[in-house]
Image: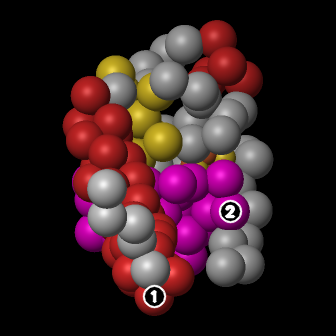
Amino acid sequence: MKTMTRRQALKLAGGVTAAIPLAMLVRRGALADELAQVDPEETTAKALGYVHASPNPEQQCKNCQLYTGEDGAEWGPCAIFPGKAVNAEGWCKSWITRTG
Ligand code: SF4
């Protein structure tokens, strides 16, 4: 049986490590497409004043810290609404400046 050299093992590990974030991005995008859109009439959405179109272009879901959608996506996940997608141009009272 042929054993793997340390160099080969490190190269393999690097390839696997590099592939994981790419797979997560692809999966995250797929998940956003699969999520049901938040209904602004739902209890939580209504309490937070969620709207699909923010009245303030400087405060939108896509620049909120709690939004985890992909850049350029129309819809994406939000920590406030687990299992649902919010509009990237939406807004609610929990909006907080994205820091990273
Ligand atoms: S917390 Fe509100 S503003 Fe922020 S992403 Fe979620 S719904 Fe949009």
* Residue 34 placement: quadrant: top left
Name the residue nearer the viewer: 63 or 59.
Answer: 63
At label 2, the amino acid type is: Gln
Q: Residue at x 72, y 71 (%)?
A: 97
Q: CA distance from mark 1 to mark 2?
A: 40 Å
Q: Residue at x 72, y 78 (%)?
A: 99
* Residue 95 placement: quadrant: bottom right
Position of residue 7 measured from the top left corner of the image (x, y, whole percent): 45, 88
Q: Is residue 92 above or below residue 62?
A: above
Q: Which residues are magenta?
A: 55-74
Quick one: SS at disc 2?
loop
Q: Is residue 17 above or below residue 6?
A: above
Circle 2 packing at 10 Å, graded few (<14), some (14-19), many (20+), is some
Identify the residue position indicated by label 1 in the image. 7
Position of residue 28 measured from the top left corner of the image (x, y, whole percent): 37, 47
Q: Is residue 18 visible?
A: no
Q: Residue at x 34, y 22 (%)?
A: 36
Whether the residue under disc 2 has CB within 8 Å of ligand 1 = yes
Q: Is residue 34 above or below residue 90?
A: above
Residue that extends furthest to the front in the rendered view of this protein:
1
Identify the residue position indicated by label 2 in the image. 65
Position of residue 49 measured from the top left corner of the image (x, y, whole percent): 64, 34
The secondary structure making up most of the magenta span is: loop
* Residue 18 placement: quadrant: bottom left
